[in-house]
Image: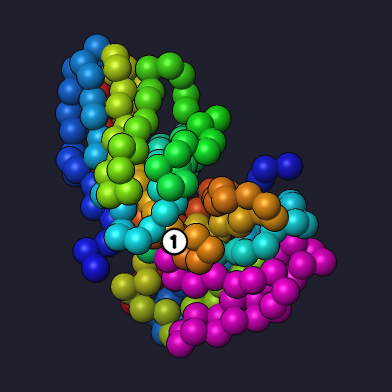
Amino acid sequence: DAGVIQSPRHEVTEMGQEVTLRCKPISGHDYLFWYRQTMMRGLELLIYFNNNVPIDDSGMPEDRFSAKMPNASFSTLKIQPSEPRDSAVYFCASRAGPSYEQYFGPGTRLTVT
Amino acid sequence: GEDVEQSLFLSVREGDSSVINCTYTDSSSTYLYWYKQEPGAGLQLLTYIFSNMDMKQDQRLTVLLNKKDKHLSLRIADTQTGDSAIYFCAEIRYNTDKLIFGTGTRLQVFP
């Protein structure tokens, strides 16, 4: 298995632009998680899905952030408009419930200038 | 509370054992995890332990759980330079799906 796949690996954009991050979970996994990692705040859970349905989005910072999972093999995290404080590494992770082994993708490093 | 706490740094000599500690606050935690993050990479699941266990061993890794004190530790035997990374502990609480991560411990191994 290829593991969790994220794209792009690096994204540099200007403030105000729309950013879309993509994730392909491990085949057969029915849970998908989006995290953000910064030096100041560590690892934060933004949102997670079960069977493509958003379960908990309480970690999404504000309305500029949105996430979708149109099918079992694809999810997007969108930031519109982006701001410099959104600069971080964004991780996607997946898990096969009821297994408790959660696997992370390599992350997308986002820089907003 | 939400906090899972770890010391920030640990420095050990190659060949020695490393012990990374973690404390958590919620007694309803069901599973506790250790992840490793190398520079520029994602988090790699190292091992995990169910809350009704006291110890789990996997090759060079030994996990100890003290539920009374809400203390989790990861011992790495014969530490190598390739073990240099940030180590995160994490917990899943009863009836939730969310992993709560600690702040991470940066392990530096010197020759």
* Quarter of image, res B70: bottom right
Q: Nearer the viewer, residue A25 or B107?
A: A25
Q: Which residue is mark 1?
A: A96
* Quarter of image, res A79: top left
Indicate the amino acid at tag 1: Ala
Q: Position of residue B104 (x, y in %)?
A: 50, 53
Q: Is residue B7 visible?
A: no
Q: Position of residue A101 (x, y in %)?
A: 47, 65
For the N terminus of chain B, the quadrant is top right
Up the image or down, B19 lies above or below A24; here it is below
For the C terminus of chain B, the quadrant is bottom left
Q: Position of residue B85 (x, y in %)?
A: 38, 62
Q: Which residues are magenta?
A: B45-71
* Residue sitting at x 61%, y 56%: B92
* Residue sitting at x 37%, y 25%: A66
**Image-based side of B56 in relation to A110, left or right:** right
Mark 1 residue element = loop
Q: Nearer the viewer, residue B12 or A90?
A: A90
